[in-house]
Image: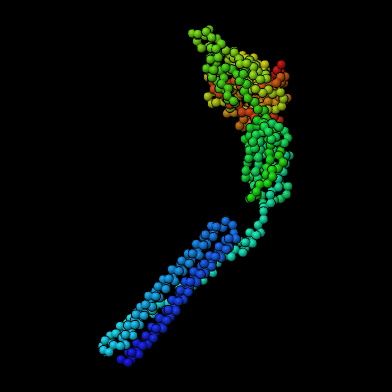
């Protein structure tokens, strides 16, 4: 019995010591928890202080780092609270066992004492207090979440205003105007590696020299140009000049515009003289369409009662009534079978080019030039003052060059678009496949009067495209075209 008491006493002593250790550990855990809270507060305070020195662009980063700290705090708090709860439960169980063991010392009955001692021993063996780790699972150290923005702050302090780029310089001598394209070339007065891109602005004008503030078109812009040249293509040169200016941009600011440069973009631009057009032609802007009903209304107004009961007049009897003269050089309206309309601009010199595209179902059309004195009953190519290519898709398809009532059959396919080249001073009229620049035919003559573009349409429509420069390929072909003069010799003449 004494031996059992000594063993129990040792157990009680061990339990008491363990309880003290647990209590100390609980105190440690509590201190760690307070440290986690205190250090978390300090870290957040430091973080706030750092972010207060930064601009709003760092708000997102600050929120992310704040969440990391709070998550770490929550994680450590949860782990330590779980460990604290386990230790508290173990301590309560151990204190209960200690109390039971102390009461067992007063048991007088040996059998009951032996039974109680066995129970105490078994419970001590299974006691949670002896299975606990008395080391905090986590420390209160939060230094891995500390921040130091000294390097970033130094970078911010080193920031300066980006210099405004200088104005580029457009080199007019290097700029190219050809084939209705303009290539603008510029350079910087000094090297600037901060430039990100360039902005080119342009506008059409009829005035040479510097841009004018009043009565000018708005600037059009091409942005984000990476190089120091740019080509504008597919332009219609319906003005004599174009103004250009360019500015350099870095990531933050755009520099001043360059001195504007004016480049000549002159090309023949003409409309259709509606006062000259046959009444059976419908003329709208650059489009001409044959309209079989076009002359009936006008004729009924002129004929009045004389037309009552009569059949619809044939094209030959179409009214010759013309509109009042409109503008310079107006003339009698074409009539009869001359389904013709003239251009509204005369060519008195120089080299010019325009194109014509016919509808696929157009039965007959002619493209050429004439003096304005051509008779109102005359057809293009049937007089000695008009020259044309004639396309006939009615009954038997033919393609021919016509002048002075003579026709030269052309053994080439009719192109989708016909290019017309007129060298007034050189006395030459040439027709080309506008797509391939294949020469179709050339007339050689001496123009003694100004000429105007002329168009004949029957059963269909054609579209005229003006404002075109003489293509480079055509200029090149002119150098070798003299070798073909024999093919047009039968139609060559001097128009009086």
Q: Is residue 316 visible?
A: no
How far across and how far down the image is residue 83, in percent?
42, 73
Which of 438 and 128 lies nearest the eye of the viewer?
A: 128
Q: Residue at x 70, y 26 (%)?
A: 423
- Give the quarter of the figure containing the N terminus: bottom left
Residue closer to the observer: 356 or 230 = 230
In screen coordinates, is 88 left or right of 460? left
Q: Which residue lies at the image location 35% right of the left edge and 82% below the top edge?
A: 98
Regarding residue 329, the answer to whether it shows in the image is yes
Write the residue at 71% across / 47% down: 166
Q: Is residue 367 above or below residue 23?
A: above
* Color scheme of the displayed model: rainbow
Q: Is residue 290 left or right of residue 161?
A: left
Q: Position of residue 411 (x, y in %)?
A: 60, 25
- Outermost top residue: 306
Across the whole image, how many numbered discs are drawn on residues?
0
- Location of residue 143 with respect to 310 vertically, above or below: below
Out of 355 and 152, give the one closest to the viewer. 152
Across and down, in percent, residue 234 comes to 62, 35
Specify the quadrant of the image occupied by residue 419: top right
Is 147 located above or below residue 207 in the figure?
A: below
In the figure, residue 469 lies in which quadrant?
top right
Instruction: Give percent across and percent down for residue 177.
Output: 69, 36
Quadrant housing the C terminus: top right
Q: Tell me the residue at 61%/20% (across/down).
A: 274
């Amino acid at each position: 019995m004494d031996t059992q008491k000594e063993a129990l006493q040792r157990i009680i002593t061990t339990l008491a010591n363990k309880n003290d250790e647990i209590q100390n550990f609980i105190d440690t855990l509590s201190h760690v928890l307070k440290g986690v809270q205190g250090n978390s507060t300090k870290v957040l305070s430091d973080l706030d202080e750092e972010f207060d020195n930064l601009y709003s662009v760092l708000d997102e980063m600050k929120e992310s780092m704040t969440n990391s700290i709070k998550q770490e705090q929550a994680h450590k708090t949860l782990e330590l609270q779980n460990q604290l709860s386990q230790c508290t439960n173990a301590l309560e169980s151990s204190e209960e066992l200690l109390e039971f063991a102390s009461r067992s010392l007063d048991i007088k009955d040996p059998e009951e004492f032996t039974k109680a001692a066995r129970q105490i021993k078994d419970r001590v063996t299974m006691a949670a207090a002896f299975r606990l780790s008395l080391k905090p699972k986590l420390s209160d150290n939060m230094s891995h979440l500390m921040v130091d923005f000294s390097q970033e702050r130094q970078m911010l302090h080193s920031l300066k205003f980006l210099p405004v780029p200088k104005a580029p310089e457009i080199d007019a001598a290097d700029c190219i105007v050809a084939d209705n394209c303009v290539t603008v070339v510029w350079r910087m007065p000094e090297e600037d590696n901060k430039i990100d891109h360039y902005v080119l602005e342009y506008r059409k004008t009829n005035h040479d020299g510097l841009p004018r503030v009043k009565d000018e078109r708005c600037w059009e812009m091409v942005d984000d140009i990476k190089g120091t040249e740019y080509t504008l293509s597919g332009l219609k040169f319906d003005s004599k000049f174009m103004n250009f200016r360019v500015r350099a941009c870095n990531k933050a600011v755009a520099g001043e515009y360059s001195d504007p440069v004016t480049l000549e973009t002159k090309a023949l631009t003409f409309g259709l003289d509606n006062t000259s057009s046959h009444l059976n032609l419908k003329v709208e802007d650059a489009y001409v369409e044959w309209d079989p009903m076009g002359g009936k209304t006008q004729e009924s107004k002129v004929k009045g009662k004389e037309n009552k009961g009569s059949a619809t007049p044939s094209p030959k009897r179409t009214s010759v009534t013309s509109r009042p003269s409109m503008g310079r050089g107006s003339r009698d309206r074409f009539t009869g079978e001359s389904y013709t309309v003239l251009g509204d601009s005369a060519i008195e010199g120089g080299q010019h080019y325009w194109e014509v595209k016919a509808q696929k179902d157009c039965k007959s059309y002619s493209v050429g030039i004439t003096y304005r004195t051509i008779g109102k009953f005359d057809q293009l190519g049937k007089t000695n003052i008009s020259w044309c290519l004639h396309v006939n898709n009615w009954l038997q398809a033919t393609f021919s060059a016509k002048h002075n009532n003579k026709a030269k059959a052309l053994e080439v396919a009719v192109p989708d678009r016909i290019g017309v080249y007129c060298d007034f001073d050189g006395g030459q009229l040439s027709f080309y496949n506008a797509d391939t620049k294949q020469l179709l035919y050339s007339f050689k003559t001496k123009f003694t009067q100004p000429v105007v573009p002329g168009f004949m349409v029957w059963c269909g429509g054609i579209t005229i495209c003006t404002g075109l420069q003489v293509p480079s390929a055509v200029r090149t072909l002119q150098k070798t075209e003299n070798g073909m003069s024999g093919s047009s010799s039968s139609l060559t003449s001097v128009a009086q």
